[in-house]
Amino acid sequence: MTPRRALLLLVVVAVLGATPWVLGHLDATRFHEAVASATTLLHETKALDTLPDTTFAARQRALAQTARETRKALQEFTRQTEAVQRAKATAFLDLAEVNLRLDAWQQSEDCLLLARSADLADERALDATQRARCELEIGALRLRNGRVDAAMQSAEAATELLTGPPTDDATCVVWARARRMTAECHLRRRDRELANATLQTAETELGKWPPHDGRRDHELAATLMLRATALAGADLTSATEQLLRRAVLAASAAHRVDPRNTEFALGLTASQRTLGHALLRLDKPAAAIELARSALNTDQELRLRHPNAPRTRLAHVLDRALLAEALGHAGGQESATARRLAAEARQDSEALVKRCPGDIDVLLARARTLRVQAFLASAAKDLTAARELHREHTMARHDITTRTGNHAAHFFALSQARVELGRCLLALGDLDAAAPALGGALLELRELPEDPAMERVRAAAALLSITVSIRRADLDGAFAELEKMTAAGDLTRAQLDSAPELAPLRRDPRFRRIRASSNGRK
């Protein structure tokens, strides 16, 4: 072999020997770049809140593409070392939050599962609190998609990871959220007693923890608000009102500790808004007006700091809708102001739907503004406008139930919307349109778990449906409906005896026969 050939062979062997090292070095470089990219993406998606609607969508698409490329680069690096697994777990947690902020829920859940896999490959990748937080984020996404059993598994896994009541601030927050998620799963399964017991335990433990930086009070307020729901369902009592008042006090305490904390400010407005709605249903509009105005003051402070942030704008929409509804209940000279506020809230909610088209909270806010506008139009005797608004509200509620699956509260809201639409159509004399709306609502309400609020709406749907037959002068049809409804338990005996809608039927012998054989609720 000539010296030249020997030298060439030596070069080839050296290149072949170095290639795996070079490629491995390049892979490692790409991996570290992907880890850094995940952190950068998180900062950039947080900055999305500062962008106006005109530039938001294009930037969101660009960040979503970068997030997909980053995830691919992280998955392709297969080296199994402690440092790599720890970096992977942290990066996937960042990417999960990125995707959540981009409304990419499935991708967010996938990233959380990948973070959990990295942690399982090396148990030192995440600490117990991080693992529990990861499980809770997975559970929240599952619950949002209506997968209650899977969400319950995540909540239970998070609770087991924390091994008992909290021992520091960070654990205290995660532990309280795990308890709330467990309770919310119980509520979705229609077990209010178990949900209430779970929340009572959380409330007791949170009460033992010193306030520190306001996080304890913030979590306590959220726990009390959910407990009010668990205690009363769709109905309200003085006990519910007291729980909500305590929630407002706790949220106010957190906000006083750190007035510039956005989470605390939003928690305060949420508690005030929830109590305001409860006071309206308890016929206390003046107190509801005061709360709504207080919440709007906090909203204004938030909007000065975060004018384009969707959650800030969402709170402002909901608080204006509450004030408009409260002013409408109060009546008098404020009616015009109420309609103006409701129209502004509706307009802003439509802009938010365009910005966050898949966000259930935004869709719910839009539905609420439509309901408030319909209520105000009916109160002003503008039945033609009310009819169109009720129709839009019903369609909005139907869209929400389609997206959220088996969610009793959303189905109840849809049934309520149908009943109000039927009532409006009946007032306009459109009997052919009123009948199917009321009949559909009644069928839906029979499938829902019984509570006092649901039973009132169910009885209203039944009585309005019979009124349609009476207005058609179809007494045979009215009695046939009444017989079916009493057999199904839609009406109580007291309602059979006292409801003014049934006055035209009471002198007929058929009414006495139906009442005598009724197995309706007493």
Image (spheres, rainbow, N blue to C red):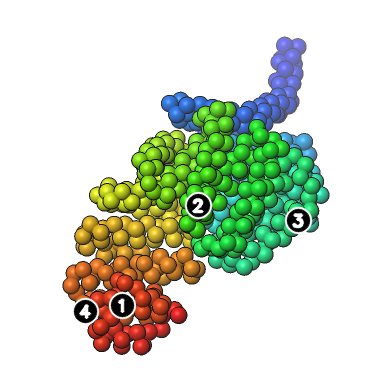
**Disc number placed over residue 277 in the picture, else none:** 2
Q: Residue at x 42, y 49 (%)?
A: 330
The amino acid beneath tag 2 is His
Image spot of residue 50 (x, y percent): 54, 27
Dot 2: element: helix
Q: Position of residue 44 (x, y in %)?
A: 58, 28
Q: Considering depth in this image, is 109 or 281 the residue closer to the camera?
A: 281
**Alpha-carbon distance for marks 3 and 4?**
61 Å
Residue 73 found in image quarter: top right
Whether tag 4 and tag 1 are in contact, CB under 8 A, the answer is no
**Residue topped by disc 3:** 205
Q: Earlier in the sequence, mark 4 or mark 1?
A: 4
Disc 2 packing (10 Å; few <14; some 14–19; many ≥20): many
Q: Earlier in the sequence, mark 3 or mark 2?
A: 3
Specify whether residue 81 is in view.
no
Q: Label 1 to label 2, Cα distance in Å?
A: 34 Å
Residue indicated by mark 1:
482
Q: Secondary structure at mark 4?
A: helix
The image quadrant that residue 96 belongs to is top right
Q: Mark 1 is on which residue type?
A: Leu
Badge 3, how many Cα within 10 Å: few under 14, some, many 20+?
some
Instruction: State the residue at coordinates (35%, 84%).
Output: 515
Q: Which residue is mark 4?
A: 476
In the image, what residue occupies the spot 79% across and 57% down? Answer: 164
